[in-house]
Image: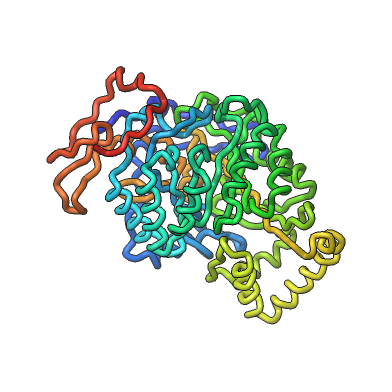
Amino acid sequence: MTETDSRLRVFCQAPIEDDPEATCGLSYMAAEQIRAAQPAQQPTDYGSALLHARDRMVATNQWTASQFMGRRWAIGCVALEITQRCNLDCTACYLSENSELVRDLPLDEVFRRIEMIFAHYGPNTDVQVTGGDPTLRKRTELVEIVRRIRQKGMRPSLVTNGIRAKRDLLDELSQAGLVDVVFHVDMTQGRKGFDSEAALNVIRQEYIERARGLRLSVMFNTTVFEGNFEEVPDIVAFSVRNADVVRFASFQLQADTGRGSLGKRDARLTVSLLKNQIAAGADTSLSFDTAHIGHSHCNRYAMGLVVNGRVYDALDDRSLFNRVLQQTAHLQFDRQSRSAAVMALAKGVLGSPSLTATAAAWLARKIWIAKMDLLLARCRVNKLSFFIHDFMDVCRLEPDRVAACAFSAMTATGPICMCLHNAKRDAFILEPVRTGGPNGGRYWNPVSGKITERPERITLSEDLRRKPAWRGPRTPA
């Protein structure tokens, strides 16, 4: 068996008492429990996944009338890591110290994992093609991976720092079936010549222009830490100004996991304060407590309607939202077509006369409040979603949050909670991979790239550990 992260030996017992949203007396998973945790077993059919997700929400007291998990979908998204390599060295990196030693998974293994995702969750599952940075993979392979996901009826997203995601690549990926491109840009990445989030807006704008006009939903990820917390409103305001292209702005609170050097975040950086910062940037109050996605201590979601540069809260009526969700839970919304999404929502609502009347009254009020902005914008309205994800520290994994996870990572044997995956990453990425199908008798070594008749024990020498962060392509031998 491979070496495990030494930090698993540390077991944090003390609750985060400075966080007003933390629960007193929290119990965390012990190192032994983390090591013993295994990916989810494949269900008999993906149709049972929705029911299983609902059972998990009920068991963890997260099942409400506004819960997406178990009602609209069985999982929020699945991370498909196609490389462990990266061309940045982020201070909040979730990769392990050994990630750069690992070669890219063989393409056949990536395809097998795509099949596993489908077997677990079925069509319309959101699959994040990620890493490391997935653009470091061979271009032809990256395109084929995206195409294979879309051919299975699932929705592929590209999560990238954007350095190699040029216009021609995004165009080719879009034609292959890419639905979303998620650009991760923030101060933890140490990009030379940029000393603030405001300065990084130059890069964000460049990335927007690369994707403009393509059939892609553009999203931005930001890791929030002490060094950029005060600039969150500026990042939000930038997204609002570009809401004609940007559809989603995600903010992830710093977590003590992986090889990053930031460590434990300042106790003053809480979800509550981050919500206030986002609202300040949007220049309006936002309802982060209306929609529920998985565990409430992990995820918060708000939606704004941007008209003439002003944001209007779209989730300010919880009762109406609950009724709409109930009526449209079976529908899928096309993120690549604004008109198709609106038509699908309207069709779902119109199926209930009483709901139609209530929704029409709410819409009339919104139109009246925004009448001047609607006039100036010629009735052009853009949707901009805001998301907060509070990843857990490696030594503070709460069993209930793990059980209610809406964001999983696919491993060789099945999906597992992303926070749990990050806590024991080496156990997954350094494990020899069986080749030749489920009954194959050969094994691929993730460090050497060799294929042998029996799984080789992987020993990491000090020389290997001293390898620089990135040396260019390391594809399978």
Q: Residue furthest front?
A: 168
Whether residue 369 sits left or right of residue 192 in the image: it is right
Q: Position of residue 244 (x, y in %)?
A: 68, 55
Q: Is residue 320 left or right of residue 59?
A: right
Kindly identify the residue that appears in the image at 33 percent across and 57 percent down: 115
Q: Which of 215 and 290 lies nearest the eye of the viewer?
A: 215
| Total numbered labels | 0
Counting from the top left corner in percent of width and height, residue 469 is at 41, 26
| Percent position of residue 308, x then y | 79, 55
Decide: is 349 above or below 433. Answer: below
Task: Name which residue lies at 69% across and 76% down.
Answer: 355
Task: Name the image quarter holding residue 307.
Answer: bottom right
Identity of the residue drawn at 37% across and 60% down: 118
Which quarter shows the N terminus? top left
Give residue 275's quadrant in the image.
top right
Q: Is residue 225 above or below residue 411?
A: above
Q: Nearer the viewer, residue 340 or 165?
A: 165
Q: What colour scheme was applied to this rendering of the protein?
A: rainbow
The single residue placed furthest to the left in the displayed view is 453
- The answer to whether residue 1 is above or below residue 243 is above
Residue 406 visible to the viewer: no
Q: Quadrant of the C terminus?
A: top left
| Relative side of 387 to 178, left or right | right
In this view of the protein, can residue 133 be seen by the observer? yes
Q: Quadrant of residue 319?
A: bottom right
Residue 221: where, in percent of width, then height?
58, 42
